[in-house]
Image (tube, rainbow, N blue to C red):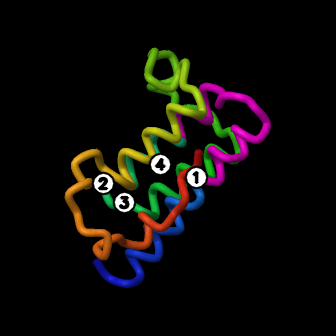
């Protein structure tokens, strides 16, 4: 991964993390639109589509509508909690099978303190 891609990945991780922190700070869960866009950003992070992920975070911040074809369909985003969003991000940043990795191999995204 290039330095630019690593920096963009770290920035995307931080933006998603900050969004979830704000939800937790105000002791509320995301609404349906916010959850949809943040889950999409997490999926883009997993797929290394960082620019698309940044756009999804912006959409969540502006509470933009869910795309027409998906708005009427039930999905994971319907009853999502802030804790579930945090766990979804944690699973991408620190996959469960990454426990065997050496501590010195941590990339920029692993340096993010994902909380409590």
Q: Secondary structure at mark 2?
A: loop
In the structure shown, which secondary structural element does the residue marked by tag 1 occupy? helix
Q: Are marks 4 and 1 in contact (CB under 8 Å)?
A: no
Q: Secondary structure at mark 4?
A: helix
Discs 4, 3 touching: Cβ within 8 Å: no
Q: Does the magenta run of residues contain 76?
A: no
Specify which label sits upstream in the sequence, 3 or 1.
1
Q: Residues within 10 Å of mark 4 (few under 14, many from 20)?
A: many
Side of 34 where 105 appears, left or right: left
Separation (CA) of disc 1 from disc 2: 17 Å
Residue 32 highlighted magenta (yes or no): yes
Q: CA distance from mark 4 to mark 1?
A: 11 Å
Q: Which span is picked out in magenta?
A: 17-37
Res 17 label: 1
Q: Residue at x 50, y 59 (%)?
A: 13
Mark 4, residue position: 41
């Amino acid at each position: 991964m290039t330095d630019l891609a690593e920096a963009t990945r770290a920035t995307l991780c931080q933006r998603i993390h900050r969004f979830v922190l704000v939800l937790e700070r105000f002791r509320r869960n995301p609404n349906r639109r916010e959850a949809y866009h943040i889950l999409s950003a997490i999926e883009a992070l997993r797929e290394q589509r960082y620019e698309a992920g940044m756009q999804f975070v912006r959409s969540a911040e502006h509470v933009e509508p869910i795309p027409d074809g998906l708005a009427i369909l039930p999905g994971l985003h319907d009853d999502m909690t802030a804790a579930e969003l945090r766990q979804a991000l944690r699973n991408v940043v620190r996959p469960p099978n990454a426990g065997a990795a050496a501590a010195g191999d941590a990339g920029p995204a692993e340096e993010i303190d994902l909380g409590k």
